[in-house]
Image: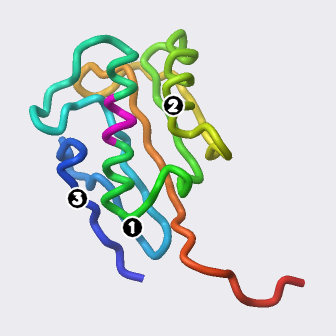
Amino acid sequence: MPKEIIRTDQAPAAIGPYSQGIKVGSFVFASGQIALDPASGKLVEGGTEAETRQVMKNLLGVLAASGARPKDVVKTTIFLLDLADFGLVNSIYGETFNADPPARSTVQVAGLPRGARVEIEATAFIFIGPVTGDKS
């Protein structure tokens, strides 16, 4: 299966040698998003809450550009500068992934690009029809 590069203005342009996302068949791999405003390319102000809300907007923008919806997300990884922010980030994250949420890992890191406090990446699977074959 060929890979399709996902590009959208609903998320910031890549700040390095990577793609916003890659789609291969029914799988979508969304690169980690930090709280860069897509229009200005600058980190949003307002602390962890504002950053997390922008991160989710960016992530959903990449997913939408691929044809994926939040319900298609099967795995996320959250990177936090300070694990003390877990409760706040978890609450905002839960606004999007509230019913049948994806599998997830959350880790504290020593640093993130551009001084960000939060980064989230996602993998989605776009279900496009019934699975056929032997189920025994």
**Can you tell which quarter of the image residue 63 is in?**
bottom left
Q: Secondary structure at mark 3?
A: loop
Report the amino acid beneath label 2.
Answer: Tyr
Kindly give the residue lying farthest to the bottom in the view shown: 133
Q: Nearer the viewer, residue 122 or 108?
A: 122
The correct choice, above or below, for 96 with respect to 30 in the image is above
* Residue 55 falls inside the magenta stretch: yes
Residue 93 numbered mark, or none: 2
Question: For the view shown, which residue lies furthest in the right direction?
Answer: 136
Image x and y of residue 131, in percent: 68, 82
- Asked if residue 69 lies left or right of residue 129, the reply is left
| Quadrant of res 16 | top left
Magenta-drawn stretch, dominant element (helix, strand or loop): helix
- Residue type highlighted by circle 1: Lys
Residue found at x 39% / y 16%:
49
Which residue is denoted by mark 1 in the rendering? 23
What is the crowding at mark 1: few (fewer than 14 residues within 10 Å), some, or many (at least 20)? many
Look at the numbered disc 1 and give the secondary structure of its residue. Answer: strand
**The C terminus appears in which quarter of the rendering?**
bottom right
Choose mark 2 or mark 1, whichever is in front: 2
Let me know if residue 27 is in the magenta part.
no
